[in-house]
Amino acid sequence: MKIRKKEKQLKPKKVHVVKIGPHRKGVIFLWILLISSVAFGIYKNFTAINVHTVHETKVIEKQVVDTSSIENFVKNFAKVYYSWENNQNSIDRRTESLNGYLTKALQDLNTDTIRRDIPTSSTVNDEEIWRVGRINDHKYAVIFSIDQLITEGKTRKTVNASYEVMVYVDQSGNMVIIKNPTICGIPGKSDYEPKAVESDGTVDETTIEELNEFLKTFFKLYPSASQEELSYYVKGSVLKPIGKDYVFSELINPVYRKAGSQVQSSVTVMYLDQQTKAMQISQFDLTLKKDRNWMIVK
């Protein structure tokens, strides 16, 4: 009997499991949360933003500065600075006039540039501005050249030279020269030679003959043609009336190249100018197209 009692005591108790119904509010909330998380993950996967480095390019817009007033100021200064007569009254007038252009320091510096016993007189025939360079908001470097007629006794000669000055412009637009005319060079002739345009064989001989006849006819008419007359040869306002008394002489080395349905032409035209009696040579780059007849379209 004792043994059975012990066996009864060792028998495990049945564990009570609490079952939650699938329709209870808590379960519904968890399902909604799970489905929302999965849906959000799929959405993010398809709409992911590519993160990349953006390199910003800063565009500095160049301001167009009207330098005509600076150019006129320097030209007027140059006329005064490089003009004198070999007498005291002329030298004194020059010195007084220069005070309207130079700083006080430069006025003092230029006191003896034209000596009282100078044997020459000078007249400015021409002055040219070659470059106006902006240093900052107020300072401009100006390169100019001067043609002077120098007279010494009965000898007269023309002298040409170039200089650079510095001009200060204040907020009101008033100007003063802060650097004395300093010798410098001016641009000379470049060695550049453009490559000669040549025919590339894309236009056949028959078409070349047609184009030559068309251009000869057109350029004979062109100098004196009205807008209405030009409209038979030219599309729109590609070439405008010039109203000149030129007599056509010849076409020189016309070059033709095919470009799709059009033909590009480089042609030199020689005219006799009836007024000057000189030969006038013009160079044209034209685009021609044929519908029913040839037309200059560009």
Image (spheres, rainbow, N blue to C red):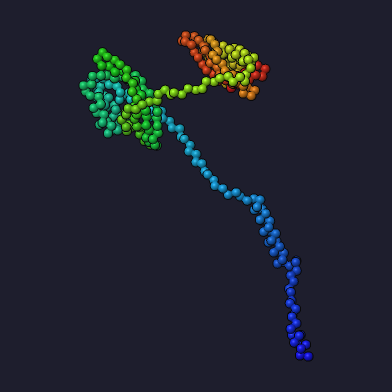
Residue 114: image location, x then y, percent = 25, 24
Mark count: 0
**Residue in front for this viewpoint, 207 or 151:** 207
Q: Residue 112 sits in which quadrant?
A: top left
In the image, residue 166 sits, relative to residue 9, either above or below, namely above
Residue lying furthest front: 3
Residue 278: image location, x then y, percent = 47, 10
Check the picture and name the quadrant holding the N terminus.
bottom right
Residue 73: image location, x then y, percent = 36, 28
**Residue in front for this viewpoint, 28 or 94:** 28
Residue 39: image location, x then y, percent = 68, 56
> Is 242 left, or right, of 36 in this rendering?
left
Is residue 291 among the parts visible in the rendering?
yes
Q: Residue 210 sits in which quadrant?
A: top right
**Residue in front for this viewpoint, 67 or 173:** 67
> Is 255 left, or right, of 146 in this rendering?
right
- In percent of the image, x 68 and y 57: which residue is there? 38
Check the picture and name the quadrant holding the C terminus.
top right
- In percent of the image, x 38 and y 33: which residue is there? 140
Is residue 239 among the parts visible in the rendering?
no
- In percent of the image, x 49 and y 22: which residue is there? 194
- In percent of the image, x 27 and y 21: which residue is there? 84
In the image, residue 17 sits, relative to residue 268, either above or below, namely below
Q: Residue 226 sits in which quadrant?
A: top right
In the image, residue 37 sits, relative to residue 218, either above or below, namely below
In the image, residue 88 sits, relative to residue 138, either above or below, namely above
**Residue in front for this viewpoint, 52 or 86:** 52
Residue lying furthest left: 117
